[in-house]
Amino acid sequence: MPHGEGHTDGADRDVTREIINTLRSSEVAKFVENNRLNNAHMDVEKHFAVAFVQEFDAVLRTPGQKEHVWSINWRLEHHTETSYDGYEAWGLFTRVGGALRPFYLAGRVSDGEGPGVSYYYLLATGDLNGDGIDEMVADETGFERELDNLELWAWERGAPVTIRKMPSQ
């Protein structure tokens, strides 16, 4: 989908057919099922609300080995006059065998009642402590402006771990 059609952010990459197919992949579907995020059995194409896509190079999984990474935040939702179902998720992906495959996924059910999960914009990566693995600086954009934070993450045991979190205002 081209920029400006409501499903993208001007600073992000276009949401392409490849991104939609990635979100429909068996790895993502299994994650959604295992974490009971898909109570309404939502279809990625039918219930797609938004995705924010970034690409960057980082050393996260193997010390000293840089890889090209895609960060994808997405939300699926289904509205009726009396109900709302959905989920919000974030993942880190690399290209394996020609297709984007997740190596980290996180998400939660969205009920439409309270503020949704934050979207993460990765601002910078770099090895700050000399261990051969990059730390990440992320902008956490919440439902309300006062929920926005600037975070410093380390990569430990296959997942980002918050080292420092401070309001971005």
Image (cartoon, helix red, strand yellow):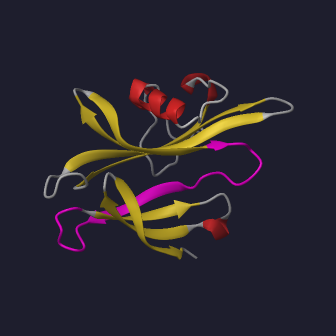
The image shows residue 67 at horizontal and vertical percentages of: 21, 47
- For the point 23% across and 51% down, which residue is it? 61
The secondary structure that most of the magenta stretch takes on is loop
Residue 80 on the magenta segment = no
The image shows residue 20 at horizontal and vertical percentages of: 46, 28
Image quarter of residue 105: top left
Q: Is residue 148 left or right of residue 53?
A: right
- For the point 63% across and 67% down, which residue is it? 147
Q: Is residue 11 left or right of residue 167?
A: left
In the rendered image of this protein, does residue 95 appear above or below residue 128?
A: above
- For the view shown, which residue lies furthest in the right direction? 82
Residue closer to the observer: 95 or 132: 132
The answer to whether one can see residue 8 in this image is no
Stretch of the chain drawn in magenta: 109-133
In the rendered image of this protein, does residue 30 appear above or below residue 106?
A: above
Residue 120 on the magenta segment = yes
The image shows residue 119 at horizontal and vertical percentages of: 53, 53
- For the view shown, which residue lies furthest in the left direction? 64
Image quarter of residue 81: top right
Residue closer to the observer: 81 or 2: 81
Image quarter of residue 38: top right
The image shows residue 95 at horizontal and vertical percentages of: 26, 35
